[in-house]
Amino acid sequence: MPVSSRLRDTSHYLSDLPSDRDFLIRVRAENDFGISEPTEPLWLPRARGNH
């Protein structure tokens, strides 16, 4: 599921994710030459405490 496009920076904040589950994300880049292969999955553990 694409989260964002047309980013100009090399970082992005993912907001409004449910805090009661873990996530695996993969990142791809797109430019005039095409779309990259996705990265290896990156594990994002669920939030701890009151964030």
Image: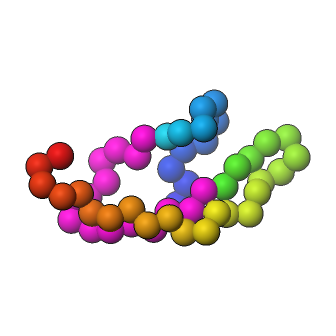
Left or right relative to 8: residue 1: left
Say how many tags the image has: 0
In the rendered structure, which segment of residues is drawn in magenta?
A: 13-27
Q: Which SS type dominates the magenta stretch?
A: loop
Of 22 and 5, nearer the camera is: 22
User: Residue at the top extreme?
Assistant: 8
- On screen, residue 44 versus residue 40, left or right, reads left
Above or below residue 13? Residue 43 is below
Residue at far right of view:
33
The residue shown at (43%, 67%) is: 43
In the figure, residue 26 lies in which quadrant? bottom right
- Residue 37 lies within the magenta run: no
Report the residue at 88% width, 46% height from top: 33
Residue lying at 32% horizontally and 64% vertically, measured from the top left:
45
Relative to 50, 41 lies left or right: right
Residue 40 x/y as whole percent? 61, 68
Residue 19 at x, y = what percent?
A: 23, 58
User: Residue at the spot x=67%, y=63% of the render?
Assistant: 38
Above or below for 19 versus 4: below
Left or right, 13 with reference to 40: left
Say if the magenta span includes residue 20.
yes
Colour scheme: rainbow
Q: Nearer the viewer, residue 27 or 49?
A: 49
From the viewer's perspective, is residue 37 above or below residue 34? below
Place of residue 41 in the rendered image (x, y in percent of width and height, measured from the top left):
54, 69
